[in-house]
Amino acid sequence: MSERHHVIVGMGITGNEAAITLRRREPQSRITIVTLASLLFYNRYDLPQVFRGKHDWREFLVHPPAFYDDNRITVRRNSRVANVDPLNKVMTLEHKEDIPYDTLLVATGGRGWIPEELAEFRPLMQGFGSFEQAITVARALPEGGGRVVMLGGDMIGLDLARTLIDTGHRVTLVAGEQTFWPHQVSAERRPAFVAALETMGVEVVEQDSVGGVAQIAQGAKGLPARKVVFRDGSELMADVVMPFYGIQPAIDFMGRTGVDVERGLLVNPELRTTDAAIWAAGDVCQIWSQEENRYRFYYGWRNVRAMGEVAAGNMTGGNDAFVADQDEKLEIDAEGRLVSPFWEYA
């Protein structure tokens, strides 16, 4: 037991919480975190603070670099996983290095999903999933107020919209099926929620009313950097175009493992996959719900943080089931503004 090697793929809140729990439960084990990121763990929910003048990456770190040395947690940054061999319990990185493991936790989270019809315009759209992307957006917006056209409008994007508006920027939302995701909003209640967005200062264009996005192009000289053209011929100019259509699990490297997959990795309530040595936690997994008789995703900061702790506990001999710790209801407060539990980060 003292020589067991626990490998975690992903260094978001889920993977970081898992590493801390593993170290607490097994003081002598080896722990390795493998991440694509160049920076150590920072809370991505804090990224909108770049619009309030917070531009030093060191201010975003949750733990100083010495924390990982002190807790003997090896962090492999800028490392992409190419393959996992469950039979031999070996993970291979893209540069052909093999990393043996005794237990493996997949906590890679999700990446922003873009509809196929917009994929060709990806170079003209700006993501917001990393510190580097956040800084790029902040620099692209003029001081004193720029304009952002937001496509889709999931709850991650709408959270960002709140900060953008508070800091003097203009946000136009092209609303569609993914607006308010992952909340499930009925057709009857949708108009009230859209009105709440407008109360908050978001300009809303319904995708159906303009026929959808036909093209995203570079703006002409002397005009804003981007132009969004709709199928009805109308246009919007913007400094930045940002897609927020929800997320898809980042599990490409698990394709040849034989582990059961639907949209995400399928796990039991203890967060174990169909392979006895592989667990999954966070936005990357679908957890079996006995009450609903289906596998389902659970989102929200508190939920994914709890999953990291539960998975690590079970990787070290526990048998605890994950219990959701976050309400999923979208509400409107007394001032007519949206209130979402997915905006709670503590």
Image: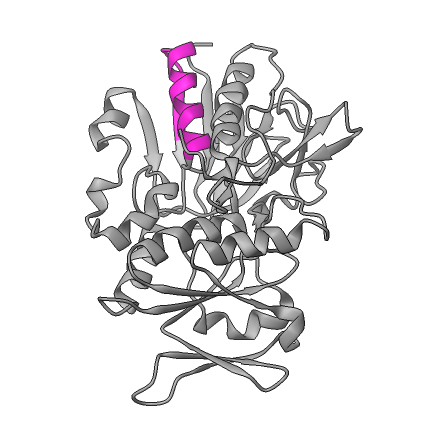
The residue nearer to you, when weighing 317 against 90, is 317
Identify whether 49 is placed above or below 147: above
Instruction: Please state if 269 lies on the left or on the right of 170 as rendered.
Output: right
- Residues shaded magenta: 13-32
Q: Residue furthest right?
A: 293
Identify whether 288 is placed above or below 320: below
Is residue 269 found inside the magenta-colored segment of the image?
Answer: no
Q: Residue at x 43, y 10 (%)?
A: 25
Q: Position of residue 319 (x, y in %)?
A: 61, 11
Looking at the image, can residue 26 be seen? no
Identify whether 315 is placed above or below 34: above
- Which of the 4 image quarters holds residue 245? bottom right
Q: Position of residue 64 (x, y in %)?
A: 22, 31
Q: Residue at x 28, y 33 (%)?
A: 62
- Which of the 4 image quarters holds residue 35? top left
Instruction: Please state if 38 lies on the left or on the right of 207 as rendered.
Output: left
